[in-house]
Image (spheres, grey):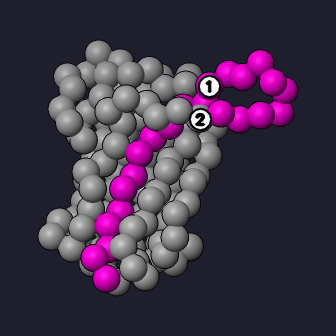
Amino acid sequence: MAKGDSLFIVRSEEESGSLTADANVDLQCKADAIGCILLLDVDTLTGSSPTLDIKVQGLIPSAAKGSAVYADIPGCSFPQLTTSNDDTQHTLTIYPGVAETSNISVSQTLPQKIRIVLDAGGSSPVCPVTIVGYWQS
């Protein structure tokens, strides 16, 4: 796997504040990128039974002009975060040929457009989360 040289920010708690509702972040991949490494930093989750699920989807080329259809990339998700495993850092590697490990690494080639889906669950969840990544050529 080639060393990543292009940092990108998916979501910054410092700039956006804590996540309190579901969110999608659409990204155009770097032209020569075939994979990426995503770094997730989560502080303490609060609310009533808060959860945070984060997965990666790829854009499916659609015959209908102007419509964007995304589908889950199999295995491309972080472990579900709850109050028992928050205040941690996680890494997710998406790269063709990498050894696969659940919620850690997935052997896939990235499509040119991806979406990071953040699903905040529970009652009144507050999820202080930052996600950054490195494109891999």
Q: Residue at x 26, y 22 (%)?
A: 98
Image position, residue 92 (x, y; %):
31, 42
Q: Residue at x 30, y 48 (%)?
A: 78
**Label 2: which secondary element:** strand
Q: Residue at x 34, y 43 (%)?
A: 77
Total label count?
Answer: 2
| Distance between the alpha carbons at the discs numbered 1 and 2 | 6 Å
Is residue 32 highlighted in magenta? no
State the image quarter where residue 102 is shown. Answer: top left
Disc 1 target residue: 60
Image position, residue 80 (x, y; %):
27, 56
Q: Residues within 10 Å of mark 2 (few under 14, many from 20)?
A: some
Image position, residue 15 (x, y; %):
56, 73
**Label 1: which secondary element:** strand
State the image quarter where residue 69 is shown. Answer: top right
Dominant secondary structure, magenta: strand
Is residue 53 highlighted in magenta? yes
Which region of the structure is painted magenta?
48-69
Disc 2 target residue: 70
Q: Residue at x 50, y 37 (%)?
A: 57
